[in-house]
Amino acid sequence: MRQGPLLAVDVGNTSTVLGLTNDALQLTHTWRIRTNRDLLPDDFALTLKGLMDLSEVATPPCAVLSSVAPPVGQNLKLALERHFGVRTFEVTAENLHDVTVELDDPRAIGADRLANLFGAERYLADREFVIVVDFGTSTNFDVIGRGRRFLGGVLATGAQVSADALFARAAKLPRVNLEAPPSALGKNTVHALQSGLVFGYAEMVDGLVRRLKTEVSGDALAVATGGFSRTVEGVCREIDVFDDTLTLRGLVELWATR
Ligand SMILES: Nc1ncnc2c1ncn2[C@@H]1O[C@H](COP(=O)(O)OP(=O)(O)O)[C@@H](O)[C@H]1O
Ligand SMILES: CC(C)(COP(=O)(O)O)[C@@H](O)C(=O)NCCC(=O)O
Ligand SMILES: [K+]
């Protein structure tokens, strides 16, 4: 088994999440920054140096990176290699020969979903399937089976994206925070909107998890992760576990088994 320290980076369409491990490959630091497609390699070098200096840690010799927002992934990789001499492993389906991606075109899979496959493995010990629900810009449902099988899943509009679409089209609706209101029955515009946007969203997620559990017809555990997952904790009834660092730890596991 390979040894740390290691930097794990997951570039999503909204946020870039970074994690640093110790020698034993346990996460000791995590950071979340805005994904900005305009930044160049030298900009990223400054950001990375800033984060490391703020936390008083050294840049590790190796990194693992998943990106679904080109060219951010490429520019970050260049920054890591040029400025810090960090050897960077980039996650793609072609790089992972021990993973079976059961999609029509396996190369089309998002790198974050491959990281989630590895993050799900620790939950597979006593279950046949894990459904990772990753609440990001899009809400992904990634269905994972034992033996590193990616069975497929669902891509749904993210909660913030659907809220933004509604605010943009309805002149009299205020922008509200995406948080659960006191009851489903709203007595004012804000609570009524929050009911639809949070409870309505949670019902959509619960319904899809139920459908997926029926379709795989095996024992399945649903695990939530991603920026919006904390908001639906206690609201979604079909989600069994909340795991904020599933994707980052998945990246670490993935790298460790190369
Ligand atoms: N720390 C946070 N706490 C609560 N909500 C968050 C947080 N970070 C992101 N979000 C919300 O989660 C959604 C995006 O999730 P994120 O994981 O950043 O997406 P992506 O993986 O696409 O980059 C947005 O709706 C955003 O408002
Ligand atoms: C579905 C996604 C946009 C999710 O990205 P995110 O919401 O995390 O920014 C990303 O995984 C992606 O671009 N996937 C490619 C298509 C696929 O996985 O089938
Ligand atoms: K993500």
Image (cartoon, helix red, strand yellow):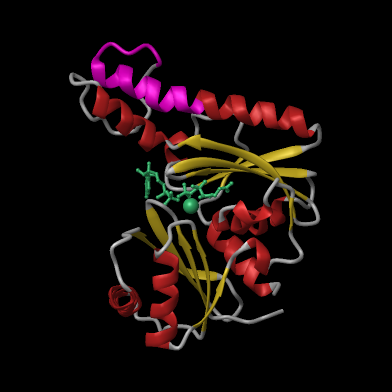
Q: Residue furthest bottom?
A: 85
For the C terminus, the image quarter is: bottom right
Res 30 seen here? no
**Is 42 situated left or right of 120 in this image?**
left
Q: Nearer the viewer, residue 68 or 47?
A: 68
The number of callouts visible is 0
**Is 113 situated left or right of 40 in this image?**
right
Residues rendered magenta in the picture: 184-202
Q: Residue 66: give x, y in percent of width and height.
A: 52, 63
Which secondary structure is most common in the magenta stretch? helix
Q: Residue at x 60, y 52 (%)?
A: 108
Looking at the rendering, which quadrant does residue 128 occupy? top right
Placement of 206 over or under 16, stated as above or below: above
Residue 186 in the magenta stretch? The answer is yes
Q: Residue at x 40, y 72 (%)?
A: 76
Placement of 82 over or under 233, stated as above or below: below
Q: Residue 52: give x, y in percent of width and height.
A: 35, 78
Q: Residue 173: give x, y in percent of width and height.
A: 22, 21
Q: Residue 211: give x, y in percent of width and height.
A: 68, 26
For the N terminus, the image quarter is: bottom right
**Is 105 situated left or right of 243 in this image?**
right
Q: Residue furthest left?
A: 172
Res 92 seen here? yes
Q: Residue at x 53, y 61 (%)?
A: 248
Looking at the rendering, which quadrant does residue 184 occupy? top left
Residue 204 in the magenta stretch? The answer is no
**Is 89 situated left or right of 20 in this image?**
right
Placement of 50 over or under 11, stated as above or below: below
